[in-house]
Image: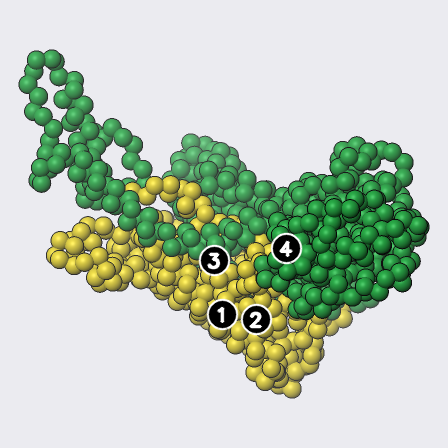
Amino acid sequence: MSKLKSTGQQTADAPTPEDAFHEAATYEDREKGKAPGEKSAGPVLAADGTPLKRSLRRALRVQKMRALMLIAPLLIFVLVTFIAPIADMLFRSVENQIVSNTLPNTVEKLEGWDASQEGAPGEEVFESLYSDLFLASEAKEHTRLGTRLNYEQTGLSSLFRSTGRDVDDIGEDQIDALEDFNEVWEEEGFWFNLMSGGQGAEKDTALVEEQRRRLAALTGDDYDAEIGFAPGAAISDLLPRTARAYTAFALFTVVDDEDVVAEEEPWEAVKVALIRELRAGVDLSGYDGPGAAELRATQDMVADLKPIEFKPAFLASDEDWGTNDIWTTIQMYSPPFTSGYFLNAVDMEKTPQGPEARPETQQIYLMLFERTLFMSLVITGSCILLGYPVAWLLANLPMRTANLLMILVLLPFWTSLLVRTSAWKVMLQQQGVINDVMVWLGIVDDASRLVMINNQFGTIVAMTHILLPFMILPMYSVMQTIPPSYVRAARSLGATNWTSFWRVYFPQSVPGIGAGSILVFILSIGYYITPEIVGGTTGTFISNRIAYHISSSLNWGLAAALGSILLVVVLVLYWAYDKIVGIDNVKLG
Amino acid sequence: MTITIIEPKPISFVAPVVAAFGAFAGLLVGTAQGNSLLGLVGGAVITGAMAYVFLQVVRQERIMRWLTVAAFAIAGFLLGGVAGGIVGTLFGWFFGWLIFWLGEGRYRAKLPPYTTSLQVFYHFLFRVICGAVFIFLITPILVVMPLSFNAENFFTFTPEMLALNPEGYSLKHYRDFFTNDNWQQALWNSVSIAPLATILAVAFGTLAAIGLSSEHVPFRRPIMAVLISPMIVPLIISAAGMYFFYSRLGLQGTYWGVVLAHAALGIPFVIITVTATLVGFDRSLTRASANLGANPVTTFFRVQMPLILPGVISGGLFAFITSFDEVVVVLFVGSAGQKTLPWQMFTGLREQISPTILAVATILVAISICLLTTVELLRRRSERLRGMSPG
């Protein structure tokens, strides 16, 4: 009678607005089918005079809204407390902004560099590296970058740490010469006047905003505070790098050190930038702002100085800066998103020639994934073997006995996971209960007690025990619905014990096996606690490695990538479970 | 009714079977006494002879069974003290029962009369296998309990314990649990986190389950998939994601961070149990109530709530036990200030092995027995309320 398929579950009681809606639709169709010329009764009206169809549709809409309003709070709660964290983890597995945030200018300059050529890039890149690294080491962010890049190439962490210490000394001689030539270059007030262009001068606020963003990206802190300084437009035009370095210094001084800009002597990087720009021959003739005379005199002086060379300075700090590998790595990991973590997670690495397999000695994750899958399969298999007879027995015993025996299944199910894991530790240890009993019975010698813990065997036994109820319960609920008369019929038709079981009973119990297996497999593939305690080194799962990367090695990106792969596997299985069993049909207890 | 033929079996069948069991029991006793072969042969001969005498000569079931128990108990006591006496009593009871059960043919009582001997054998073999699986399921839990009363700091049975010597037992691990600050702090943390997480999960979950059970929910399947996902996603992944995300929000290492995380983990259980209860809920009751003039809130609290309460409570218990037992997420989302009982047990198992863990485990088993009983009673009550036969 109804034309539309009903959504939602049928509760099979009183008629609902939706039923009436379908009735009305059918009624209308019948009207349309009438031969022309026949008199139509017109639309059916509800009690208040509106067409029945519209009135019913409104009622339906109100019901839908009410249902959604009831669900909304929980949905939002789960989205915020659970789905958002998962999404964040997925994001972290590809996110790689730390390189471009810490070394923005270097990354820009490196773009054009051809990694296949021998040695390191040219002076230009090193100059950008100097300004980036100087700021980063002031903000103490260079070690973080070093740690990050160290995951890709060992040695980079110490390289960044040591060079971060030496970077202050680059251009030392030239700065000394500058300060000897005129003492004003050591005066905070003079610098402040020079850079701010004096009272009432036109300001370059765009530069301040740019540096705010730069520092915020670098440190992750907020740099929106009022700093009482903005570079003068004239000086910023004339000496752009010096102005940029000084603005960064000003922001850092106010926000991080909580000092006043005009009372602090600028960083070496500012002076280095000034010397570089003066030597490059800027035209000072049109400039008449504060400090114009000193600038002109200094320009003449610095022309005679030895040039500041960054590349030799970096190489003097650590000769690794001259090698091709370092720069290849930096260039490869400079984009804001990377597939590097995922490649790591499947034992591959990024190279300029594209992804390549790691050397065999460094391969670990594929082996761990394989082991996780293998052990989960073994656990699922042993759960089926042990669970099937028990489920059959429970389904075929009289209700009262079955309920009593059910307690033996449900009690482990309700017992704390850690209680069961500690129980297995007690049982399986070399000085444990099982070994003691076997020694007492003379099955094994006291000197050669069996090693049953801290290996795969221990993990499999303990997890089979822990997950067995999850296998028995779905099997039991399926087997309860199989009528015993089928097997009896098969037997009376001449089937043997085995045939009647294999051809008649077993096929009907397959849905239970499927449901239980997927459930057990999903649960075991992501297990952490039990393998951690009884698994030793050979019985651990991929989840133990994830936990290790989160809490010990702090390689969060790799942990997130491993987690994402595991999540995809589980979601595929979840989807299969939904297809076979339906999420709504999950039963507990 | 099945027609069963119970008739005495020939001694040529009973005696060897009993002797086989006796040989096995004798092997155990003999090994414990240092002479396996003598035990094996002795056990077979003694029990075989007993079967012959009981069935062919005396045939006084009640008297002979008592005699067997007494004889075995005394023999056991002489060999191994009190513990030996208890084992002897059990053996005596078993063999007395076995001889007459087999000899009178009572073992066929519940089987169809046409079953062949081989089928009878398979039937009991199957029972034995199932029994072994049940033992596998329950032994670890049972072993923990007596060990928690160990007077020594060992994880295994001491000779004094096996001899049932009172000096082998003590409550010192329980005393340690109740006086040690670490354990008490952990207990307090667990007790203060779990109820709040449960309340959050139950409040949100019940509302949503009611919404989900109405007929006209758009996007029902995707919504359900999202709400159930905390149960399906491996805990280590949830923990990792929450650790990353909660540290961005400043919730990592706070009480509320752990409570929110645990509430999210408990929600699927509430949804599943309450939805299951609502399947059988008669919707015309709410219409009748509305018809009689009750507003939706009154209808909810006076009509719907009392009927679905068993489901709500068992869902709440599930959520509670989830939070109370949970260790992976709290390990990452919490800090030292939120150390819960399972966390303390986990560190205990990994680092300093102390039998106090077994005392805690025993207490937790007692708690889970209480919860299991409650849930089971609630389930039956709910099925009664909905007019289903109590299972």
Q: Are marks 1 and 3 on the same chain?
A: yes
Residue A140 appearing in the image:
no
The mark that comes first in sequence, 2 or 3, is 3
Q: Give whichever of B347, A100 is nearer the camera.
A: A100
Q: Contact, CB < 8 Å: mark 2 with mark 4?
A: no
Instruction: Tell whether label 1 touches label 2 (CB within 8 Å).
Output: yes
Question: Residue shown at 27%/30% (left/top)?
Answer: A4
Q: Residues within 10 Å of mark 2 (few under 14, many from 20)?
A: many
**Real-space Cα separation, disc 1 to disc 4, in angstroms:** 61 Å
Chain identity for the colour green used in the image: A
Q: Is residue A303 left or right of residue B44?
A: right
- Along the line of sight, the residue nearer the viewer: B75 or A507: A507
Label ID, residue B193: 1
- Name the amino acid type tagged 2: Gln
Please name the amino acid that badge 1 sits on: Ile
Q: Chain of mark 2?
A: B
Q: Look at the numbered disc 3 and give the secondary structure of its residue.
A: helix
Residue lying furthest bottom in this view? Answer: B167
Q: Are marks 1 and 3 in contact (CB under 8 Å)?
A: no
Instruction: Please give the residue where the numbered disc 4 appears in the rendered image.
Output: A201
Give the SS element for disc 1. Answer: helix
Q: Which residue is mark 3?
A: B264
Q: Would you name the residue on which mark 2 appears?
A: B338
| Tint applied to chain B in the drawing | yellow
Tell me the kind of residue under disc 4.
Ala
- Letter of the chain that mark 3 sits on in the rendering: B
Which class describes the residues within 10 Å of circle 1: few (<14), some (14-19), or many (20+)?
A: many
How was the colour assigned to the protein in this rendering?
by chain
Mark with earlier residue (2, 1) = 1
